[in-house]
Amino acid sequence: MTTGALLPQAMLDELAADPTLGSGNCLHYAFAANPKRDSEFIWLDHEVRAFSETYTSLSLSSLKSVVDRYAAWYSEAGVVPRDLVAVYVGNNFTNPIHFFALTGLGAIPVLINGNMDAEIAALFIEKMGAIGLFADDEHYRAIEGHLRPGERWLFQVTDTTVSEPSSPLPSWYPYVHSAEDPTLICHSSGTTGIPKGIINLHQQFFYGPRHCIKSPPESRLTGLASRLGDELSLRVPQRGMSAYPHSHSAGISFLTRAVLTGVPIMIVADQRPKNVLRLIGEFAPTTFGAFSELYAKLSQYDLTQYQLSSVQTWLNTGDTAHEAHIRPLVNVGSHVEGDRLVPGSTFVDRLGSSEMGFAMLKKEYSKDDTSYDRCVGTPFDFIDAQVLGEHGEIFGDNQVGMLGFRSPTITPGYWNDSEKTYLAQRAGYWMTGDVGYRDEAGLFYHLDRAVDVIHTRNGNVYTLPTEERIQKACPDIADVTVIGVDAREQNGGAGHSEPVAIIWAEDGEILHVEALLNASNLALQSDMPGHGLSAMIVVECGDVPFGATGKVIKRELRTRYRRFLADPGVRASLARDFAIATPAGRRVAEVVAV
C-alpha cells in the first residue's frame, strides 16, 4: 500500500508558518516543497478529461501540468485577475482542477454543484457576473437555453470543445495574492430559496487547512505516525477518501489539505452507498469525509458485510448527524489503543456552513458513547461561539437562541448582495440561522434551523430533536423529516402549525405506518409532554425534494403539505398516492409497500 508523497511534519510546520501561503497558491507551494512530486497520491473512481487526455490518478507533477494547461487556455481566452468564471460540471475532480487553474491566474472560480437545476444555475451565474462558463456537455445542453446573451461573455465552452492552448502562461502566473483577494465563490444549499454566492478569500479560506496541517486536529488519525512510531505508521499509513460534493468549499478544503500534506486520497464521484462501501474496502482509507446525508444512507446497510476495518475516522461537516446514523458507523472500522488497532471507529461530527469557511463546533463519538441528544460539542480554540437573542443580546446557559460566531474563517459576505451580508450579522457575530443553546459545561446543542421551527399552540417544536426521537423509536425507517403544517381551520389556532413526519423506506420494505406513528408519539410525549405528531406520511425516497448537496428541502415540503391538516379534500387526495396515519379517529391508511 503506497504512502504517496507524504511530507514529514517538520516540512508541514514550515509551510504552515509561511504567511504568503493560502488558498490561491497552495498547489504551487506544495509542488515546490514536495520532493516526491512525481509519486501518484490522488486516485479517482472516474475518468476526468483534460483536453485530449483522461486521468484516473495523478501526482503533483501531473496535476500541476493539467492545471497549467487550463490556466494557459483561460489566459488565451482573455481571463485576467479578478474575472469571475463559472464551472458547471458533474460531481467529479474537474471542479478542483479548474479551481486551481483559475486561482493561479488570480481569477475567481464560481463552482456550481452539478445537481443544481439548470435554470437556477443560469440565474445564479448572471447574478454573480461571470464572464465565462466551463461546463461538460451534459450540463451545457441543460443550461444553454437559460443563459442570456450579453457583452460580458468571453466564452462558453465544454470539456469536448476546448482545445489545447497555443500561447504560453502569462507573466503574472502564478498570481501573487494578497490576503483579501477572493479565491472562490461557492453557493449556499438553496434549501431556503435561491442560492447565495459565498465569498472566500486567500487567507480566510485557508485558515482551516493551515490549522489542520500545523497541529494534530481532533481526530485520531492525523499525527498517527509521530505518535506511534515508524513501525505502526508503515502498517497503517494515512489515507483519505472524499465523498463531499467536489464543487463545495468543504470538498475543496479537504483536497487542499491532501495536496499540501501529500496524504493519498481517493475522490469519489459515484456516491451511491453500495459503490462507496465497495471503494472503502478497495482503497482502505483511514479517514472518510462526507456530509450527513450520505452517512444516513450508509447506516441503512448491514455494514458488517463490507470491508471497513481501515476506517478510523468518519468526518462529517455541515449539518450534524443523527444518533441513529452514527451508531452503525462507529461499530465498524478501527482505532488505536496503545500500539495496536482494535475494532470500533470514531465519528467526528462538525457543525458548520459554507459561510463559516470551516467547521465551528465539534464532537467525537465512539461505540461506547451514550451522550447524544443533539449535542454538537465545543468550538475550535480560534472561534468565539455564542447564543444570541433577537437584538444581539448574548444569552446565558440553557437559554435557547440563535447561534452566532466570530472566527477568522468566516466569509466576508455574499457576492453582489450587501443587504444579505449585513442582515447575517448581529452584534459582531455571524448568524448561521441555527437555533440552539449552551449548557453549564460549555457544550452546545443544535435544535433546528430558525426557518424550520414549528410554532404550535403549546409552544415551539424543534424538528431536529423530534426527528432524533422518531428514529430511536422506529429503527426500521430509513430516514425521517419533520415539518410544520398549517392547522388554522382544524383547531382554530390562527397562525399556528402542527408537526407532521414524512418518512421513507428502502425499496421493497413494508412499513406499518399507524404503529410507527403510535410509537413515535409515545416517545415524544414522554420527552415533550403536550407535543406529538399530527400525522405521519410514508413516501418513496424519490418523492422527497433534495437540494443540490443532498439536503431535504423542507420549504418545498411545507408548501406541498400546507393544506394537508386543514383541508380533508387535500388529505383524501394525497391518500391515493401515499400511506398516511393520523392519531386515533383520523386514520387514512395503515400499511404501505414501497
Image: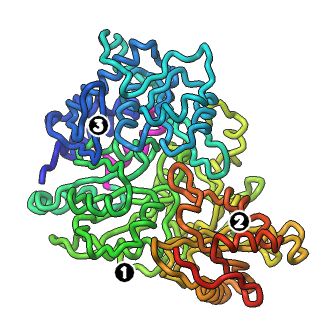
Q: Residue at x 30, y 32 (%)?
A: 49
Marks 3 and 2, how far apart at CA: 45 Å
Q: Quadrant of residue 460?
A: bottom right
What scheme was used to colour the molecule? rainbow
Counting from the top left corner in percent of width and height, residue 239 is at: 23, 54
**Residue occupied by mark 2:** 453
Which one is in front in this view, the residue at disc 3 or the one at disc 2? 2
Q: Position of residue 87 (x, y in %)?
A: 46, 32
Disc marking residue 515: none
Q: Which residue is mark 1?
A: 368
Label 3 residue SS: helix
Q: Could you say which is closer to the camera, residue 59 or residue 438? A: 59
Q: Residue 189 in magenta?
A: no
Q: Tell me if residue 205 is in the magenta stretch.
A: yes
The CA distance from mark 2 to mark 1 is 32 Å
Mark 3, residue position: 15
In the rendered image, residue 425, in percent from the top left (x then y), is placed at 68, 45
Q: Amino acid at mark 3?
A: Leu
Residue 529, image quadrant: bottom right
The amino acid type of the residue labelled 1 equals Asp
- Observer-side mark, 1 or 3, equals 1
The front one of 155 and 259 is 155
